[in-house]
Amino acid sequence: MSDDRPRDAASGHRAVAVNVGANTNDPGFRAPVDREGRFEFVPIPEREPTSEPVPTYGDLGLSLDVPESVRDTPVHLDPAFAEYPHCESYTYGDPFGVKARPLLDLAAGDWAFFYATLDTSEEPPASHPPRWGAFLVGAFRLARDPLSGEDYRTADASTRACFADNAHVKRETFDARVLLYGDPDESRLLDRAVPLSAPSGGTDANHLVTDLSADSGKGPWWRRPLRYDADATAELLDAVAAVQAGGEP
């Protein structure tokens, strides 16, 4: 995915955005986003036994001050972004039906977006909420149809190899209900976070949620999967491209 709108962008293709990354419940802090939208992606802890060693928070080389209490805690690197430390490809897995179901409805060529709650700067720009908000942080253009957990278990070796980098595959007990594989030329961890929260506050959804997605933006929308039809996906991609170029969504 280039800094400008991706080539062959959204014609006829849909998107789903899901919540990922560190938060105040797990592991107890959020990553920051600055006035220019620059941010660090911080994964959640790995809570399950793994079949091979996985990196810790201390291994990620993060610039933010990670609490000493979690520096040696293994991380759940999901989604995996090829440009992120200790990752090799673009994969995502999820064990929960509330996210797996809408993601399984996607197809090759569709988009998966990832959003996280981030702490905003002390003097946020006009497009950012005070204190914290939900922001798009990454995107996959799906290189293949989503794979259900059942299909992965019976898949051939070449298919399974696509997901060798995924955190759920590295668990002693594979538990994903869906697996996504992103096109390496059309997927990325964003350079600048794209706000989904309104300037009035983190719990208030902005137009990228209320006008474009199928979600009402009421209640805890920032925890829910957000569905976008083809027209809305095209507009969302334009907003993402605008922010990557230093503009407003």
Image: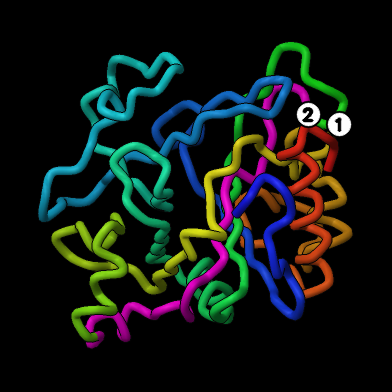
What residue sits 49% from the left and 73% below the top?
A: 143
User: Residue tagged by mark 2?
Assistant: 129
Disc 2 marks a residue whose amino acid type is Pro
Left or right: 59 in relation to 5? left
Q: Quadrant of the N terminus?
A: bottom right
How many other residues sit within 10 Å of disc 1, few (<14), some (14-19) or many (≥20)?
Answer: some
Q: Which callout, 2 or 1, points at the residue further toward the start of the chain?
A: 2
What residue sits 56% from the left and 81% below the top?
A: 107
Left or right: 149 in relation to 208? left
Q: Which residues are magenta?
A: 129-155
User: Residue tagged by mark 1?
Assistant: 200
What residue sits 44% from the left and 28% below the top?
A: 28
Residue 168 rendering spot, x and y as whole percentages: 28, 60
| Residue 231 vertical placement versus 235 (above, below) | below
> To which quarter of the image does residue 92 belong?
bottom left
How many other residues sit within 10 Å of disc 2, few (<14), some (14-19) or many (≥20)?
Answer: many
What is the secondary structure assignment of the residue under circle 2?
loop
The reply to whether the magenta stretch includes residue 151 is: yes
| Residue 179 vertical placement versus 139 (above, below) | below
Q: CA distance from mark 2 to mark 1?
A: 6 Å
| Residue 108 vertical placement versus 221 (above, below) | below
Residue 238 rendering spot, x and y as whole percentages: 80, 54
